[in-house]
Image (cartoon, grey):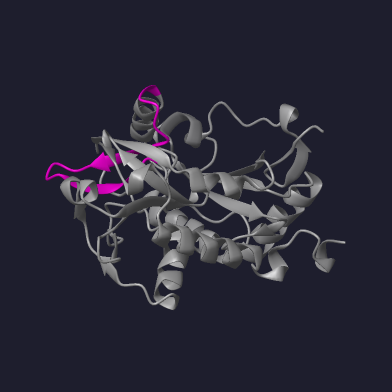
Amino acid sequence: MSQIAFVNGQFLPQSQSMISIEDRGLLFADSVYEVVYMMDGRFVDMTGHLDRLERSLNELEIPLPMSLDVLSFKILQLAQKNRLETGMVYIQITRGSAPRDFKFPQNVAPNILMMVKRMPKGREANLRKGIKVVTVPDIRWKRRDIKTTCLLAQVLAKQKAHEDGAGEAWLMDDEGYVTEGGASNAWIIKEDGTFVTRHADHLILSGVTRSSLLHLIKKLKFKIEIRPFLLSEAYEAKEAFISGAAALLTPVVQINSHVLSDGKIGPYCSKLLDAYLNYGKNADESYRWEHPSLS
């Protein structure tokens, strides 16, 4: 089945989708993006992702090309046209196309493109195997709270992780603190069962999945500390994990050469993952593509 994409109001085969060579997202990474995960035919945390998309656009003074209500409907239509059951929809909005110049162009409409990425049904079960992470210096700019497509530092970090046989890279500041992962938020669980994750400021992306997990952690009555943690703390942790729209909740069983939880998922991660999967599979019915409004 040929995949269908969405470009500037049109659904068309992905192989035929085109955008101007003068698009500012291409020339300057002058654009933002979001990724929304679909689990068993339902989008998870759609409202949170669209709210963050709007915030990122506002920070860069890029107008929304359509209302959030219309955008959410287009996302659902795209999923339906692709018969997506498990996977992601990628959404990117750029400042638009104009002759190459650093300053903002005048009277230019933003470009919007969306595409899907399929994932095998039941992939959530593989998350329990856990991954290795490696650490690399954090060389990104200082507005990481904006979900921009300027991702070269993450590309280099992810490549290093791949070369080292790891599933993710943790980015380190100059003082030895973990900021976040290349495409995820970072967490540790102390010996007493306390969850620790960095506060959401300009130095990390405020993860939508992170917010949902914080709610579930409180609901499960686990202890939580919102603060930075040192790599040395992570080495001594009982458990660790990453979170994100694609990662969901993925246990970390090795950090560099340090093995955690005997190299397998621990009890705290297991319980929280169960809670999150249940949360995702019972997501808002209005974000399911079989919803009557789409028929």
Q: Which residues, given as a range, are shown in magenta? A: 163-182
Q: Is residue 46 toward the left or the right of residue 184 in the image?
A: right
- In terms of depth relative to the viewer, which is nearer, 167 or 267? 267
Q: Is residue 198 toward the left or the right of residue 230 in the image?
A: right
The answer to which quarter of the image holds residue 64 is bottom right
Q: Is residue 181 toward the left or the right of residue 273 in the image?
A: left
Residue beneath the point at 28% across and 41% down: 171
Q: How many marks?
A: 0
Residue 31, how many percent across, how many down?
47, 43
Image vertical order of residue 212 relative to residue 90, above or below: below
Image vertical order of residue 173 relative to residue 156, above or below: below
Is residue 239 inside the magenta stretch? no
Residue 268, how many percent across, how many down?
40, 62
Q: Which of the image's four quarters has the C terminus?
A: bottom right
Is residue 177 inside the magenta stretch? yes
- In terms of depth relative to the viewer, which is nearer, 125 or 142? 125
Q: Which of the image's four quarters has the N terminus?
A: top right
Q: Is residue 37 visible?
A: yes
Residue beneath the point at 67% across and 30% down: 18
- In terms of depth relative to the viewer, which is nearer, 235 or 76? 235
The answer to which quarter of the image holds residue 164 is top left
Image vertical order of residue 208 relative to residue 104, above or below: below
- In terms of depth relative to the viewer, which is nearer, 273 or 57? 273
Residue 129, how many percent across, how many down?
49, 43
Q: Is residue 108 visible?
A: no
Residue 90, how many percent across, how many down?
59, 44
Task: Give the farthest residue toward the top.
Answer: 163
Task: Give the farthest residue toward the left.
Answer: 175
Q: Is residue 267 toward the left or the right of residue 173 in the image?
A: right
Residue beneath the point at 64% across and 43% down: 114
Task: Give the farthest residue toward the right.
Answer: 295
